Each structure stands twice: as structure tokens, then as C-alpha cells.
Amino acid sequence: MKIGIIGAGNIGGNLTRRLTALGHEVSVANSRGPETLKALVEETGAKAVTVPEAARGAQVVVVTVPLKNVPDLPAGLFDGAAEGLAVIDTGNYYPKERDGRINAIEDGGLTESRWTEQHIGHPVVKVFNGTYAQDLLDRPLPAGAPERLAVPVAGDDEAAKRVVRELVDELGFNTVDAGGIDESWRQQPATPVYGLRAGVAAVTRALAEASPERPAAHRA
């Protein structure tokens, strides 16, 4: 599968490592330019590209950048992507630590991923936003393994969600359908499932126990 990764931080870098090891054709981009990705390219065999090039011909694109940088992504980013493109959003809103106040999230009632969708102009599938980056390398297990971790997956496009869930399974993790993007508050920071290392039953229970009220510590 041809996969583009936009953002080469902890999550983006480790997804590049895992997906190339699984045999996927991975292009990776960051805001600083392809020349800054030399070490990751040499390690993984991925191709370093510019941000607009990362989506060209891609069947899956992972957007894993700070939320405050989402509006800076180029317009028409996905125009050259493959038909049926699935876009993965791993983002989280950290108003105090990093992103500043985003009124549409704070006051407008938008989930973080719905806000991201509106800026990038394409539906997203939210996954891995509460996953520890190192777990992508250290904790994958084969299907059926009793200790296999599960992650929630939210999205409105059922076909795209199916593609993403199959990819997550290939990466060595189970998935739990967390509903549509308007329900993705259930996996945002400070919810029971955020950062939870557990199987399907516990993840399902944590999603059900979530509250839509954003805690004061996670508000601007």
C-alpha cells in the first residue's frame, strides 16, 4: 500500500518504521523539509518528500502534526491522492501546553478531529491519538494473542474506517469502533481510554464511561 505520513515526530517516525518494515511504500514529510529526514530515511528506506508530495498517489495519509499547525497544511493537499483515500488523524488539542486557544473547540462544541476535518477538507479516521509512540515498536502482537492491546477508531466514512482498522490489525493491535467523528470526544485527552493499555473489553468499557465535559485542566 502507498502511504504518506505528514509529521515525523514520535508517532510519525515510529509509524514510518513499522509500516516500511511491513513492506508498505512510505513517503514521509515534515515542516522543515526532506533534507532534515535523512537519518529516518536511511534507517527505514522510506522516501523523504515535501508535504504536498506526501499525499500524491497515496491510499492512506497519516496527519500527525500539532493541532495548531493543521491550518498551515497546504490547500488541495489531497487532490492527487488515490481514489478512496483514507486520512488518519492522530492529533490532540493541548491548549495550555502547545496549541493555544481554539475557539471552535472551546466554545463551538467541535471535536478535535471535526475541527481538523474542516481545515484539511477531507474526512478523517481518528486513531493512535492516545497511543504511546514507543508501544508502536514494542507492543505489537499477532491476532488472537491474549495480551494484544486495542485502540479506539472513530470516523464517519465506513470504507475508510475499514481500511484503517485492517492497517492497525496489520500493525499488531486490535481495534474498537468508537463511532463517528462527532463521538470522538470519547478518546480525546483526559478521557478514560486516553493512554489506556488494555484489550478490547476494557477499551470498550472506557469509551462508554467517557464524559463529554472537557476537564478544566484541558481547557484554555
Image: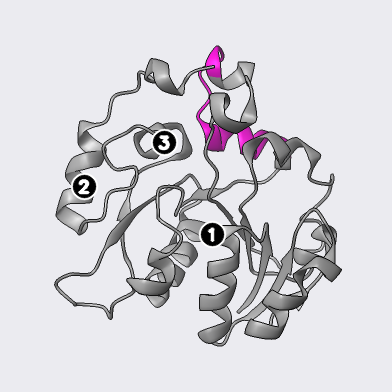
Q: Nearer the viewer, mark 3 or mark 2?
A: 3
Residue visible at 76% across and 65% down? 54
Earlier residue among tags 1 and 2: 1
Badge 1 amino acid: Ile
Percent from the top left, x then y, of residue 46? 69, 80
Q: In the image, is residue 62 above or below residue 48?
A: above
Q: Is residue 5 left or right of residue 94?
A: right
Q: Main secondary structure of the magenta part?
A: helix
Residue 114 among magenta residues = yes
Q: CA distance from mark 1 to mark 2?
A: 23 Å
Give the SS element for disc 1.
Answer: helix
Q: Position of residue 123 (x, y in %)?
A: 60, 46
Magenta-highlighted residues? 106-119
Looking at the figure, which quarter contains the N terminus? bottom right
Q: Is residue 185 above or below residue 36?
A: above
Q: Could you say whether the residue bearing mark 3 is in a helix, strand or loop?
A: loop
Q: Nearer the viewer, residue 87 or 33?
A: 33
Q: Position of residue 184 (x, y in %)?
A: 42, 37
- Identify residue type, mark 3: Gln
The residue to which callout 2 is attached is 204
Q: Is residue 116 above or below residue 52?
A: above
Residue that mark 1 sits on:
11
Note whether 199 is above or below 215 in the view shown: below
Q: Nearer the viewer, mark 1 or mark 2?
A: 1
Q: Residues within 10 Å of mark 1 (few under 14, many from 20)?
A: many
Classify the position of the C terminus by image quarter: top right
Can you identify the residue that label 3 sits on?
188
Question: Residue 131: percent from the left, percent from the top?
Answer: 40, 54
The extreme top residue here reads 107
- Residues at badges 1 and 2 in contact (C-beta under 8 Å)? no
Kind of element beneath mark 2:
helix
Question: Sequence-wise, which precedes: disc 1 or disc 3?
Answer: 1
